[in-house]
Image (cartoon, grey):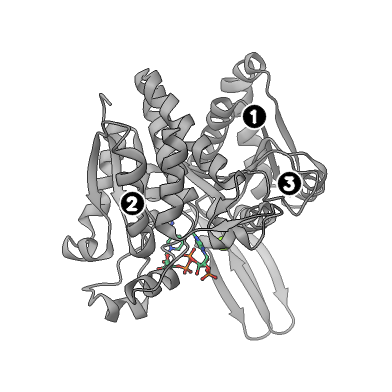
Amino acid sequence: MATPIVEMDGDEMTRILWKMIKEELLEPFVELNTEYYDLGLEHRNETDDQVTVDSANATKKYGVAVKCATITPNAARMDEYDLKEMWKSPNGTIRAMLDGTVFRTPIIVKGIEPCVKNWKKPITIARHAYGDVYKNTELVIPGPGTVELVYTAADGSETREKVMDFKGPGIAQGIHNLDGSIESFARSCFNYALDLKQDLWFATKDTISKKYDHTFKDIFQSIYEEEYKEKFETAGITYFYTLIDDAVARVMKAEGGFIWACKNYDGDVFSDMVSSAFGSLAMMTSVLVSPQGYYEYEAAHGTVQRHYYKHLKGEETSTNSVATIFAWSGALRKRGELDGNQELMAFADKLEKATIDTIESGKMTKDLALITTLENVTVLNSADFIKAIRAELEK
Ligand code: NAP
Ligand code: MG
């Protein structure tokens, strides 16, 4: 590896898996070159969260990062880790610095069948990670009166739009988005579709929301025509826009194999729908792609706290490491692509194949054993599952 990847270590059970994956599946096969950042909560607290900022800056420098799941502190964690402050979500900090879009793709194996029987290929959700209802301002309207939207321009001039003449109590909400953020979202989606050579779908409710949602539609359309149309035609893929309710109906009837770009709230809702319909959050990869072409790979699940506490008590755990393994293989493959390193790309393919073959041969963790259609299943603990993959990889 001529260029390092940025390695962001994390917390709890996933931190334990992280070490095992490196020792069993990576270091014996690859001369790993990483720049290590410890995003474990203790070290974030020691460095006043500077380590998170440093790791995001390193990602801008090297272009590729792999991240372990991390704790987002809440009140209980303040006591548990004796924190100086309730540090922000590392994912939020990194996302804000890289200005990206999050793409989530299910990992498909034989024996873990999607609930939607015609889904034969993965459906990747691309979620816009800025604005709308996640940065809203709300009012409880106690009684009769008028609610207006007021825009005060830099020169002091005002534009007003009436929301409602309330005759009695009710509620109101103001939301916004930024052209710049929507443009980044669009470019990340178009680039990722070209990367995966898959069709891109996008949907909003522009017939009802004639300015807000229509702006999303228009920005996507003009960036597509000006920058991507020819590239899409050359790659043999299409960009398809439709209304959100039509998109949902079509997704249910489709066989998969495309990217579905979603506004922030739609992405929140539909990524959980798609991941649970495909089987498990532990079989879901997640990558943050910035418009400048920086990539950060991670698992879609959290630190699996419940299993960690069992582990601390010396009890056996059966935690699924597949999404974390695929975060590594994704990052190594991307590093290989960017550096023209064929061997590294080939290793990423082999690691993924060994992982899938292990499960398809009936060796899996408990979460999958509960939902598989395979017979003669062997349920393995966290460490033995990784060792079984190593045996397959060595073959
Ligand atoms: P979680 O870690 O995703 O786990 C929730 C439950 O899902 C687990 O208790 C387990 O169910 C199941 N599960 C998730 N991943 C699994 C795996 N790999 N193998 C087997 N089962 C798995 O969510 P959480 O417990 O709500 O959150 C724990 C911590 O993670 C929190 O501090 C949160 O802030 C953090 N978090 C981080 C990220 C991130 O860094 N990207 C994302 C989400 C949450 P059973 O207990 O039934 O076996
Ligand atoms: Mg959600």
Q: Secondary structure at mark 2?
A: helix
Q: Is the residue marked by circle 3 packed among few (<14), some (14-19), or many (20+) residues within 10 Å?
A: some
Identify the residue shown where x is 34% and y is 74%: 314
Residues at circles 1 and 2 in contact by the CB criterion of under 8 Å: no
Q: Is residue 60 above or below residue 89?
A: above
Locate residue 96 relative to residue 57 in the image: left or right: right
Q: Is mark 1 within 8 Å of ligand 2?
A: no
Question: In this figure, which residue is indicated by the disc labeled 1?
Answer: 198
**Nearest to the observer: residue 274 or residue 171:** 274
**Mark before the other along the chain sequence, 2 or 3:** 2
Q: Which mark is residue 20?
A: 2
Figure quadrant of residue 302: bottom left
Q: CA distance from mark 1 to mark 2?
A: 33 Å
Q: Is the residue marked by circle 2 packed among few (<14), some (14-19), or many (20+) residues within 10 Å?
A: some
Q: Can residue 378 be spotted in the picture?
A: yes
**Nearest to the observer: residue 306 or residue 146:** 306
Amino acid carrying label 2: it is Met
Q: CA distance from mark 2 to mark 3?
A: 48 Å
Of circles 3 and 1, the one toward us is: 1
Q: Which mark is residue 206?
A: 3
- Residue 24 in the image: state x and y as whole percent: 34, 45
- Residue 326 in the image: state x and y as whole percent: 47, 42
Work out which residue is located at the far front of the displayed protein and give it.
376
Identify the residue shown where x is 27% and y is 53%: 52
- Please state, as top left, top right, bottom left or bottom right, where the C terminus lies in the image: top left
- Residue 170 in the image: state x and y as whole percent: 68, 80
- Residue 149 in the image: state x and y as whole percent: 59, 62
Of circles 1 and 2, the one toward us is: 2
